[in-house]
Amino acid sequence: MKARRTVAAALSVLALTAVAACGKDGTPDSDAGKGGSAAPQLPVYQVNAAAKLDASKTWTTAKTRGKLVVGAKSDQPFLGFEDVQTGKRNGFDIEIAKMVAADLGFSADQIEFKTINSSARETSLSGDQIDYYVGTYSITPKRKEQIDFAGPYYIAGQSLLVNKDNTAITGPETTKDKAVCTAAGSTSVAGIQKYGAKVTTFESYSLCVEKLLTKEVDAVTTDDSILKGYAAKNQGQLKVVGTPFSEERYGVGLKKGDAALQKAINDALKKHEDNGDWKKAYDATLGLSGSAAPAVPALDPVS
Amino acid sequence: MGILFEKDNFSLFVRGFLGTIELSALSALFALLLGVLLAAFRVSPVPVLRGFGTAWVTVFRNTPLTLLFFVVTFMLPRLELHISSFTAAVAALSVYTGSFICEVLRAGINTVPLGQAEAARSLGMGFGQTLFLVVLPQAGRAVIAPLGSVFIALPRNSAVAGAFNVFELFSVQKTWTEDSAPIFVSFFWLALAYLAIGFAISSVLSLLERRVAVAR
């Protein structure tokens, strides 16, 4: 009986600490990266006040409105993340959204970010709910039938996140019979299964990362950009390994048929890639993971 | 409607169905054992046991099931306690359902006339004998219907496990949706499967009720 009581007491304590821990885990440490003395700083973007884009209906509407509505993700650390306490957003995708906005003539405080789930992206673009979308949005032929893309501004690919001290996993070929975690239903499941890995699935990548930290899975797999975000959040504990084994070309999504806006965004991306802002933005966000910046991808021609 | 018969969907569906049954059956077994034990605690003459039973029921009946899954899946490993996802799911479901069973049984115990226990005691039976030989059998007969509701809720509650790395019926839906199957069609087949499970349980219980129910 005594043992039973102890177990019960332990379980009740657990139930309580779980609540506390959930809150903590859900919020990436916003101070991360401030620890080092030479923490990379986010670039400041010069707002192009003279921007004029009368050919674009989206732009003229936004100008009359006085602000830009940008769709983004809110749950990807160092990519597109919203701090629910302060309401502030940060991450590499958010920086891309800001640098584009600056060239379109909108300052950072003239941007209203809206969290849009992956499944609702095309509908909110074609339904004019947002002016453009930046959030790990892969350019695919199927999506291009409904919307247009500017970019790509980043080329991601399926990769592996492991514990820092793990030397056994160096790429997908080394995951045979290893426990690999990914999000339920995602395309990453098939991507890693063909290498013979034992797949564990949870609702979100953050739960997988939790399992990785307690060493119950050997690796987490999805786009390297997302993994770098988690590596940056858990600096010194996790690392991204191997070369990406698929190709996801992230673009800025916009309403179909607005060639003027598409060209303007492409120009903006090109300008900030050339003047070093892109690299600076990477270093201050995903770069905190310890992975070096990949090459800047060539932009697709305006369709 | 044809989605069930495309590609490997049928074997996937069967695997999910068996997964749900296996998970529910095991959890039901442990929940029943736990429920009986807790009910015994709650009516026992020992204050510590009564307190333990009350605390257990209060905590686990009021905790959302998803939170319990979080605790067993993500907190236990932090305490160096590693169990498989399936074991974790059985643990969470049993602990949760057990507290409901305990309360149902306690209500049943209250329907047994006090004279029964007094008669048992005057025959020289101890607390355990009185409870398990005289009171609980009568209590059980009285609560078959509410107990049935708890057991029918269990397989449906087990759908939560799909989010915690256990393959069951609800995980089938996720795979199908990602495969861009129409939501209504997958809903149809899954609802049918859950309905079949629920119907089987209620049939068994109503049969049992006809056999053993106390006529008052």
Image: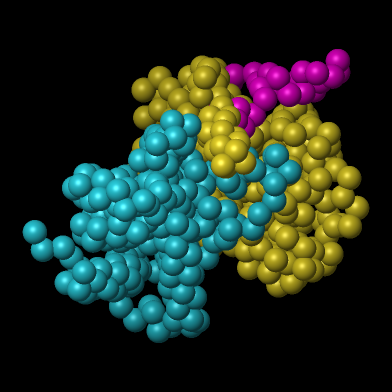
Is B96 covered by the magenta stretch?
A: no
**A27 vs A111, nearest the viewer:** A27
The C terminus of chain B lies in which quarter of the figure?
bottom left
**Count the marks: how many?**
0
Q: Colour of chain B?
A: cyan
Q: Is residue B81 above or below residue A68?
A: below
User: What residue appears at the point 71 percent right and 72 percent down from the top-left corner?
Assistant: A194
- Residue B61: name its quadrant: top left
**A3 vs A8, nearest the viewer:** A3
Picture coordinates of residue A118, whole percent (x, y):
48, 48
Q: Which chain is yellow?
A: A
User: What residue appears at the point 56 percent right and 33 percent down from the top-left corner?
Assistant: A9
Is A28 covered by the magenta stretch?
A: yes
Which span of residues is magenta-colored? A21-48
**A206 vs B128, nearest the viewer:** B128
Position of A172 with respect to B206 (left or right) is right
